[in-house]
Image (cartoon, rainbow, N blue to C red):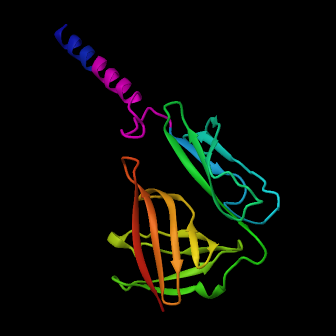
Amino acid sequence: MKKITQITAIFVALIFLNSCNLFMDPKTEPISQVSIKPYVKLLGPQYMSLQKGETYVEHGAQGSVESENGSELGYTITDGAVDSNVPGFYAVEYKVANQFDWALYKYRGVLVYEGNAYGPDDIAGPYDYSFLKKGILISKRPEPGFWEMEDIWAGPGGVVFPVVFAETGNNTYAIVPGIHPQKGFYKGGTITITATTLKYELFIVGEDGEIQGKPGTWNRK
């Protein structure tokens, strides 16, 4: 009888602990395994270029739980409303959350330009980091006005950090926000390129939700 009572007590305690996990703040506490992970997928292209006045078509996103084939969830656009009459870069933010408010985000980069607003193609090519001397490449993407950098962070600690960025004029560029598998959420950033250097500031979102700027400089070869 005593053994049965002990087993019952352990079982009740486990149920209590699991139920507590359900009410943890998903933004600050580890997510319980009984919570169902949300999933978000962009519909349509991730990067878009539009001439001023051209109609912007919102392709939307697809939200679900646990996997691509899980139960459907709705999405909300929480930032980056595109005005195709105003030239500039827009980072459209899509949010999908489960019933415990555990949210995931995806981003669509939209560049609205006027006339022939794209800069010269000579920013493509190799760059050296001023400290680690590690060479990286910048290459042009198929979408006009967008570029890809294979590792903006020069691999500190062995971390490779690829980014996509868009031209915003006067040798400046905007980094499309995203989620890095090791460093987590980054809220975009800025890049300035001259004849000799590439200077950047990457906006990393910390565990406390605060945005931390991570600057760096590359030398053009």
Q: Which residues are magenta?
A: 11-36
Residue 23, magenta (yes or no)? yes
Who's the residue at 33% across and 83% down the image?
131
Who's the residue at 58% across and 70% down the image?
165
Which residue is most to the right? 54
Q: Nearer the viewer, residue 190 or 41?
A: 190
- In the image, residue 84 above or below residue 37: below
Q: Nearer the viewer, residue 46 or 109?
A: 109
Split into 4 quadrants, where in the image is the N terminus?
Answer: top left
Q: Quadrant of residue 160?
A: bottom left
Who's the residue at 46% across and 33% down the image?
35
Q: Quadrant of residue 157?
A: bottom left
Q: Position of residue 121 (x, y in %)?
A: 65, 85
Q: Quadrant of residue 95?
A: top right
Q: Position of residue 56 (x, y in %)?
A: 78, 56
Q: Position of residue 19 (x, y in %)?
A: 38, 24
Residue 10, magenta (yes or no)? no
Which residue is most to the top? 1
Q: Position of residue 177 (x, y in %)?
A: 54, 59
Which residue is most to the bottom? 221
Answer with left or right where residue 124 lies relative to residue 202. Answer: right
Q: Nearer the viewer, residue 166 or 141?
A: 166
